[in-house]
Amino acid sequence: MLWLLGVVIYLLAMATAFMGYVLPWGQMSFWGAKVITGLFEAIPLVGKPIQELLLGGFAPDNAALNRFFSLHYLLPFVIAGVVIMHIWALHIPGSNNPTGVDVKGPQDTVPFHPYYTAKDGWTIGLALIFFTALMFFLPNALGHADNYIPANPLSTPAHIVPEWYFWPWYAVLRAFTFDFLFIPAKLLGVLAMFSAILVWFFLPWLDKSPVRSGNFRPKFKIFFVILVIDVLILGYCGGAPAEEPFVMISQLAAAYYFAHFLIILPLLSRMEKPEPLPNSITESVTGKPLNTAS
Amino acid sequence: MVRIIGILVGLFFSGWLLVSFAMGAKEYITNPPAETAEHAFHEHPKDISFTSDGPLGKFDRQQLQRGFQVYKEVCAACHSLRLVAFRNLGEIGYNEDEVKAIAANWPIQTPDIDPNTGEMSTRPSLAADKFPKPFANDVAAGAANNNAIPPDLSLITKAREGGAPYVYSLLTGYQNPPANLPEANQPGPGLHYNPYFANLNLAMAPPLAAEDMVSYSDGTKASIDQMAEDVTAFLIWTAEPKLEERHQAGWAVLAFLLIATILAYLSYRTIWADVKAEKKKKAA
């Protein structure tokens, strides 16, 4: 439950970020909006009406800008609501921990406050230092120069790229270059891009391993490291222009991405022999068995 | 059930991607894409540094004023500066009277006609006015410039890949086309070869064609390099007039966060001391 709500929050944050990117109404905003709403056009039969409904017209214009602006401030409230549900899910159905072993007694845990407020407090400080340095000294490092040119429907930028956090998914979208029988490549790309995130919803059912921690699954660890590198490669290809060899690299990387979640994980959870689990969290940390008497 | 469907979907997506990869790779090997002249002859911006670079960067006011003079006497003939007002010139060291004098010499069109001649009338600019556009509209701008509309320069150092070094390289990068340039990429009529421009041929004629096109009042020698550097510095300022304030605020915020984070780290160590000691004791 906690995981599913987390994925919902991630999706909402992506939507909010995209709508925010459209608001400056520069070249990349305009053409980004055109590309993203163009994705819906790929859906057979209902695609075109859906796209026109989203944009309020046949192309991004004032109506689109207005509704994206409304949604951009509406969605954060929706996110806040889901965050509340997320916290509820943390307290009622509960969460996992790095050892994957259930809590067996009060000695296994420490109170959130002061222990985790203190620990999170200083790591938030580190994150803010990084964020501040980026914001005050390199404000344009992650943006795109074209967005300082006002939106012009008559002039298309040489390369349309989304913001950096969308790059991996954009690479998946562009990896589909050939039609499959009667399904056009564009629709395949759109389906694959949405599946790439929706697959996370099914993770609890795809990965049926009895062990709930990667720490005790040596093969899983290897595949996970490959996945992280794979997503980084996808991200790089998504930011690069749509030319060879980037398209071919992203095809291989996207193939591994789907294979990892949909083929490797289900099979691995059945075939892998996990290492022995500790008897309790206390034991895994201190090396001594949990003293249930005290 | 979910897993069986999942494996089938996964096989489909991964399989089709591998097939696409194979087809793409075959095409790539049998028919490799030829390197375009735009790619082969294009050059990356020259290495040049400005006083405003880096986290400690500050503007050189004297240089900005020289750069403004270049804009006024050379660029302004074709390029607008629509996001900058005359009063902003106060920020680069002109006093109020100087700003007023500069504005007064710059006629601005009014939405009115001269009652005697019936022509569009103008008035002297005020300090509060934005820089007037050299052309009434894009159509006029295109018609006067071989159909290439001169871009607005207010944000140009942020709105081009490569930033300020690109602008400087473009201004100083005009040259004769190399002998081995393919016929299709030779500059056509009204175009000028410049390897720093993405498609190599640029409609803008070399704007800084000769030395001493402007005469600097501070005695600096107006070489082409010097003028290009000065006007680029000026355009960095127009694109980001608050750059110095941003840098200063950044250091103040960083100093605050650094102290706060160190304090937070120390309190984290104190609070966790007993838990960690227990771990160490039992592990030993």
Image: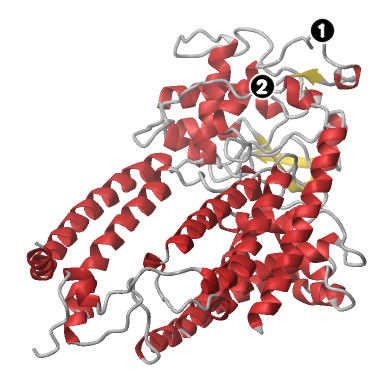
- What is the three-letter code of the residue carrying label 2? Glu
Dot 2 corresponds to which residue? B43
Rendering quarter of residue A192: bottom right
In the rendered image, which residue does mark 1 sit on?
Answer: B179
Chain ID of residue with mark 1:
B
Question: Relative to B189, does residue A275 appear above or below in the rendering?
Answer: below
- At which x and y percent is residue A281? 25, 77
Labels 2 and 1 positioned on one and the same chain? yes
Q: Residue at x 78, y 74 (%)?
A: A56
Q: Quadrant of the C terminus of chain A?
A: bottom left
Mark 2 and mark 1 lie on one chain; the one further toward the N terminus is 2
Q: Determine the image quadrant of residue A39.
A: bottom right
The residue lying at 78 percent from left, 26 percent from top is B38
Residue B17, x across and y down, in percent: 75, 56
Is disc 2 in contact with disc 1, using a CB cutoff of under 8 Å?
no
**Secondary structure under the numbered disc 1 in the rendered image:** loop
For mark 2, name the chain. Answer: B
What separation in Å lies between label 2 and label 1 (alpha carbons)? 16 Å
* Residue at 64% over, 59% down: A169
In screen coordinates, is B143 left or right of B178? right
Q: Is residue A23 visible?
A: no
